[in-house]
Image (cartoon, rainbow, N blue to C red):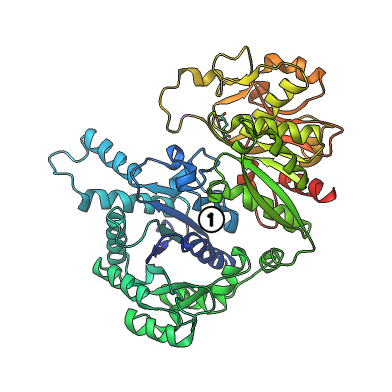
């Protein structure tokens, strides 16, 4: 008998490009498209292309580029990866964030290894081949039905050209039934008459065509639903069927966007084009989850005190985790972003404003600027019995505040902030001493954490062990364990066989809990991360 290996599935690829300008919500369109396909029963995933030359997002300024999203496998990724995870509830790996830096690194490494011996290494075909390989590798290794690939930047940018060229080639190689292009554009309204302008979309499609790509679907961002006349005009000029010109008008919550797309027949359009058989959506609890972000009974005010508040995107996962937690108890969380520098250099009297909030959250951060303000705010939350949640830097500086004000180690500090401090209660992790390169060398990614029974942490997680993601170089210095414990701080979870402390808590406080890990990356709509949920519940109570 002939034994034939089962044919490997042919994955299909949806490419999402952006036109007109940045910030149109390409990430949400990508996530929502993937969600629709997932709800139709397909095995999907997403990829983010970042055309910048950095190897990853780890070395970029959060105020300029937004949060660094950390994956289970320790990737320091673009923040759009967070949306992919929140929508699909699939843990992405770092391979899903492809940058120009990574592609060139691969090509140059291969060149040095002699893989292209005798050839002149060029953007076409060598760089474009490397891009195609990276995308194909994910689809085949994960045996995906469909991979949704979001190309960062705006069509017309020099940096994104090799990527778009690679996708154009993929369409040629794989055929129409295996590739589809969605272009995200904008229909702005300029005058009081409220006419939706279509010219920017027309121009941006022309730009895309010049590169050799004809979009199949246009996702047009607009404030109110796209009007029929605008849809007709766009269809005509862009040569895209009217039913494939999709209105992406403002929705009450991003989790409603899959419904907005589906109400216009998005899945059907994709299915027809790609020859997909399954076109019935099984919404499950998704609609209810999306609805929970607009059906609130009351609200609470949470102060987020950090260093990068000028751009709320630098804490985007924190923001979503707070919203997830609020939605779980039907409370709208109003987040107030407060610059920690407000509380230092004579700004101590500003601390009293914090009494106006139901809870105080201190997120991650790096470096000295603004750190004294954070220490003062953490102390204020403790002394005034205001619910406090500390994340990473917010964990470390809560310890410094406790050491100074409760243990009376007035000069306690983190060596990150003062390298010669006499009481280095937060110190470099020993493993970090030999590290010289900055990129990708922190303690990164998911680690197992053991929770001490009968602690607040055990109550929050209802488990004796969890896995959470990390991104840090410093840690609590356990030489001080006795003194902080005697003074009432409970270190309630550890990792790496006890070498690392992961959570702290203060009993007899309304809620004072801080974690060394980044709890926010594990929060999902309908499944808020437990520490956030406990914090928001505690805040709502008082
Ligand atoms: N700067 C601190 C460290 O490196 C905290 C990092 C963070 O908040 N992500 O340990």
Q: Residue at x 63, y 53 (%)?
A: 320
Q: What residue do we see at 67% from left, 69% from top?
A: 287
Q: Does the rendering let one see residue 448?
A: no
Residue at image coords 57%, 69%: 258
Q: Decide: is 523 above or below 116.
A: below
Q: Which quarter of the frame holds ligand 1?
A: top right
Quadrant housing residue 139 = bottom left
Please give left or right for residue 478 compared with residue 199 in the image: right
Residue at image coords 84%, 39%: 510
Reply above or below: 201 against 366.
below
Residue 210: quadrant of the picture: bottom left
Q: Position of residue 105 (x, y in %)?
A: 31, 39
Q: Residues within 10 Å of mark 1 (few under 14, many from 20)?
A: many
- Judged from the image, the secondary structure of the residue bearing numbered disc 1 is helix
Outermost residue on the right side: it is: 508
Q: Where in the figure is residue 91, as x and y percent of width and height?
A: 56, 48
Q: Quadrant of the N terminus?
A: bottom left
Residue on which the image places disc 1:
84
């Amino acid at each position: 008998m002939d034994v034939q290996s089962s044919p490997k599935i042919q994955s299909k690829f949806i490419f999402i490009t952006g036109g007109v300008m940045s910030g149109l919500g390409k990430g949400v369109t990508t996530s929502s498209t993937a969600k629709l396909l997932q709800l139709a029963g397909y095995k999907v995933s997403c990829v983010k292309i970042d055309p910048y030359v950095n190897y990853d997002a780890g070395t970029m300024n959060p105020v300029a580029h937004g949060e660094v999203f950390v994956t289970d496998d320790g990737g320091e990724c673009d923040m759009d990866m967070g949306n992919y995870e929140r929508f699909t509830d699939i843990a992405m790996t770092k391979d899903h964030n492809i940058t120009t830096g990574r592609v060139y690194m691969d090509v140059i490494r291969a060149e040095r290894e002699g893989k292209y011996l005798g050839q002149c290494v060029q953007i076409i075909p060598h760089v474009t081949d490397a891009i195609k390989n990276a995308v194909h590798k994910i689809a085949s290794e994960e045996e995906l039905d469909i991979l949704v690939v979001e190309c960062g930047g705006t069509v017309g940018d020099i940096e994104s050209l090799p990527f778009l060229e690679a996708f154009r080639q993929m369409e040629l190689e794989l055929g129409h039934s295996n590739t589809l292009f969605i272009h995200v554009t904008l229909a702005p309204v300029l005058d009081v008459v409220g006419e939706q302008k279509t010219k920017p979309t027309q121009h941006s499609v022309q730009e895309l065509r010049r590169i050799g790509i004809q979009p199949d679907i246009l996702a047009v961002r607009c404030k109110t639903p796209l009007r029929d006349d605008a849809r007709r005009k766009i269809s005509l000029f862009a040569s895209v069927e009217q039913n494939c010109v999709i209105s992406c008008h403002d929705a009450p919550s991003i989790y409603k966007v899959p419904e907005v797309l589906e109400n216009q027949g998005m899945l059907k359009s994709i299915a027809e084009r790609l020859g997909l058989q399954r076109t019935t959506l099984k919404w499950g609890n998704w609609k209810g989850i999306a609805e929970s972000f607009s059906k609130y009974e009351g609200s609470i005010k949470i102060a987020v005190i950090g260093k990068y508040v000028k751009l709320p995107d630098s804490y985007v996962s924190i923001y979503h985790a707070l919203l997830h937690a609020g939605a779980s108890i039907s409370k709208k969380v109003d987040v107030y972003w407060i610059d920690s520098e407000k509380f230092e250099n004579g700004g101590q009297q500003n601390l009293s404003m914090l009494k106006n909030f139901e809870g105080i959250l201190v997120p991650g951060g790096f470096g000295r600027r603004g750190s004294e303000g954070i220490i003062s705010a953490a102390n204020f939350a403790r002394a005034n019995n205001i619910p406090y949640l500390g994340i990473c830097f917010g964990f470390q500086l809560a310890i410094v505040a406790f050491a100074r004000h409760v243990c009376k180690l007035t000069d306690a500090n983190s060596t990150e902030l003062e390298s010669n401090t006499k009481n280095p209660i937060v110190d470099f992790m020993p493993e970090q001493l030999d590290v010289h390169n900055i990129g990708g060398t922190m303690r990164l990614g998911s680690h197992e954490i053991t929770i001490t029974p009968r602690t607040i942490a055990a109550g929050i997680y209802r488990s004796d062990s969890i896995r959470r993601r990390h991104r840090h170089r410093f840690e609590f210095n356990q030489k001080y364990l006795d003194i902080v414990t005697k003074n009432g701080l409970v270190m309630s979870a550890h990792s790496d066989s006890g070498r690392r402390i992961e959570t702290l808590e203060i009993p007899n406080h309304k809620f004072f809990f801080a974690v060394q890990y980044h709890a926010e990356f594990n929060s999902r709509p309908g499944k808020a991360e437990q520490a956030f949920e406990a914090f928001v519940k505690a805040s709502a109570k008082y």
